[in-house]
Image (tube, rainbow, N blue to C red):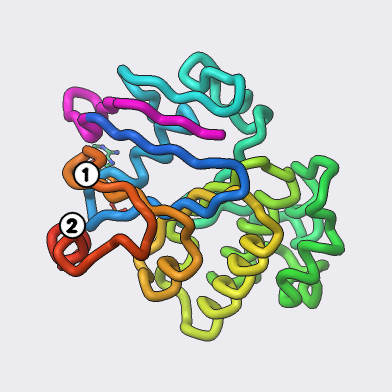
């Protein structure tokens, strides 16, 4: 579904990615891992054309994403929940959900069933939600576009444990629905049991790809330990 090959990405003169390879198959939950600053967010920004890759290939189904502007990448069927959740603060919860909606499995009713807190707060302005509720809203909004591939960047970071558990329950539900997902998250204890495959980045390069069961202690210590 998504194929990223040998991408190199720069911020001005400073090179952040030196050869990232990554793929996501239809129906798969793919974990993108690595310590802080290894290039996970930059890889996602490159896929969405926000920080375009300078070389390499990025294809999604039949689309050559490197040739498309960001809004066309969304139209091609990719949905992004960026780090640091972005909602429209002065729209209500329900308005936030419907404003970019496209028809498909994820209807308002299904998203509200996935996140009952959003249903309870549907008329509230988004800016009055807690951080965790705003994160749920950001995920709900992305789902309402019915993306064929959903990309979650640190969706549970910095949230209270009870909220994190609700978000992980929703992510498990996405997996049960065979939603194709690319996910970056530091909570490996939650992520690894759900992931079909993992790719690990080290200093802007892909250094390991495989099934979580093949992730032995030496790989963990080398690439994921602090
Ligand atoms: N806007 C920017 N300008 C310059 N360099 C940047 C910028 N954003 C990230 N970098 C650099 O690019 C490299 C990769 O950062 P990136 O944010 O992609 O890593 P990450 O794996 O997502 O880390 P984290 O887990 O901390 O979010 C780092 O060396 C970082 O300092």
Q: Quadrant of the C terminus?
A: bottom left
- Answer whether residue 152 is magenta in the image: no
Q: Is mark 1 within 8 Å of ligand 1?
A: no
- Answer whether residue 6 is magenta in the image: yes
The mark found on residue 223 in the picture is 2
* Total labels drawn: 2
The residue pinned by badge 1 equals 207
Marks 1 and 2, how far apart in space?
9 Å
Question: Percent x, y for residue 81?
Answer: 55, 51
Residue 19 placement: quadrant: top left
Question: Percent x, y for residue 44?
Answer: 42, 40
Q: Quadrant of the N terminus?
A: top right
* Region rendered in magenta: 1-18
Residue 119 placement: quadrant: bottom right
* Vertical relation: 101 (above or below) 224: above
Q: Residue furthest bottom?
A: 162
Left or right relative to 113: residue 135: left
Q: Residue furthest front?
A: 214
Left or right relative to 212: residue 67: right
Left or right relative to 128: residue 14: left
Residue 14 placement: quadrant: top left
CB atoms of marks 1 and 2 within 8 Å: yes
* Vertical relation: 25 (above or below) 135: above
């Amino acid at each position: 579904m998504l194929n990223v090959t040998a991408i190199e990405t720069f911020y001005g003169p400073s090179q952040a990615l030196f050869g990232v390879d990554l793929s996501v198959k239809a129906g798969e939950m793919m974990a993108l891992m690595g310590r802080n600053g290894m290039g996970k967010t930059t890889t996602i920004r490159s896929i969405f054309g926000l920080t375009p890759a300078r070389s390499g290939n990025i294809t999604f189904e039949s689309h050559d994403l490197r040739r498309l502007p960001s809004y066309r990448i969304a139209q091609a069927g990719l949905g992004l929940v960026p780090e640091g959740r972005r909602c429209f603060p002065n729209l209500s919860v329900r308005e936030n959900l419907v404003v970019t909606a496209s028809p498909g499995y994820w209807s308002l009713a299904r998203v509200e069933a996935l996140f009952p807190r959003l249903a309870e707060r549907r008329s509230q302005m988004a800016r009055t939600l807690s951080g965790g509720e705003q994160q749920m809203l950001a995920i709900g909004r992305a789902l309402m576009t019915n993306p064929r591939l959903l990309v979650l960047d640190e969706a549970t970071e910095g949230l209270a444990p009870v909220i994190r558990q609700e978000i992980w329950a929703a992510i498990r539900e996405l997996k049960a629905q065979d939603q194709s997902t690319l996910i970056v998250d530091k909570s490996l204890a939650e992520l690894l049991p759900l992931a079909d495959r993992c790719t690990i980045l080290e200093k802007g390069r892909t250094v390991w790809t495989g099934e979580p069961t093949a992730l032995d202690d030496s790989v963990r210590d080398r690439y994921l330990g602090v």
